[in-house]
Image (cartoon, grey):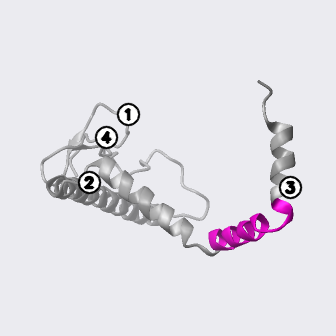
Amino acid sequence: MEPGQDINLNSPNKAVGVDGAGSLDMPAHVEGGAMGSSNPLPPGLTEEEAEELRTELAKVEDEIITLRQVLAAKERHSTELKRKLGLSPLVELKQNLSKTLQDVQTSNAYQSATATWDDITHTEAWPRFVQTRWIRVRPIL
């Protein structure tokens, strides 16, 4: 992590990702740790413990930044592979919708509802029901 980098998503200060392509928002290091030494210590916390916590926090924040950079690089790589395979966002959406529809149609709830609907529509009363409802809701022309 380099000094002067900013994590704010709306920040104009963008950092270059792991592979040198694209931009990522990176946090700036605050002197004396993420909290700074000007904050009062919580009750029961010694200066030494606070410094250890600040050091650990800085390490965790650095790890988070590294993970974000790796994730961004992998997302770019995934996008490039999809482009090479001819998988446009529209093709992906179509595939996702088809898969979702198939999942719904094979679900127990859908199967049960379809069976119930089939049972209802194959009764002797169904044609009379449809006829009386059709007469009531049919628009007058």
Of the two numbered discs 4 and 2 on the same chain, state the one appearing first in sequence: 4
| Image location of residue 133, percent across then percent down | 84, 46
Q: Specify whether 108 is left or right of 119.
A: left
Asked which secondary structure carries label 3, the reply is helix
Alpha-carbon distance for marks 1 and 2? Answer: 17 Å
Which residue does the numbered mark 3 point to in the structure image?
128
Alpha-carbon distance for marks 2 and 3? Answer: 62 Å
Predominant SS of the magenta segment: helix
| Image location of residue 50, percent across then percent down | 46, 61
Q: Quadrant of the C terminus?
A: top right
Near-viewer residue (113 or 77): 113
Question: Residue 30's mark?
Answer: none
Neighbours of disc 1 within 10 Å: few (<14), some (14-19), many (20+): few
Alpha-carbon distance for marks 4 and 1? Answer: 10 Å
Asked which secondary structure carries label 4, the reply is loop
Of the two numbered discs 2 and 3 on the same chain, state the one appearing first in sequence: 2
Which residue does the numbered mark 1 point to in the structure image?
10
Above or below, 20 against 10 in this view is: below
Q: Specify whether 56 is left or right of 121.
A: left
Alpha-carbon distance for marks 4 and 2? Answer: 16 Å
What residue is at 36 percent from the left and 58 percent from the top? Answer: 95
Asked which secondary structure carries label 1, the reply is loop
Amino acid type, label 1: Asn
| Image location of residue 122, percent across then percent down | 76, 68
Alpha-carbon distance for marks 3 and 1? Answer: 63 Å
* Quarter occupied by residue 23: top left
Q: Is residue 139 visible?
A: yes
Mark 2 and mark 3 in contact? Answer it, CB < 8 Å.
no
Which residue does the numbered mark 2 point to in the structure image?
72
Question: Residue 6's mark?
Answer: 4
Amino acid type, label 4: Asp
How many numbered markers are drawn?
4
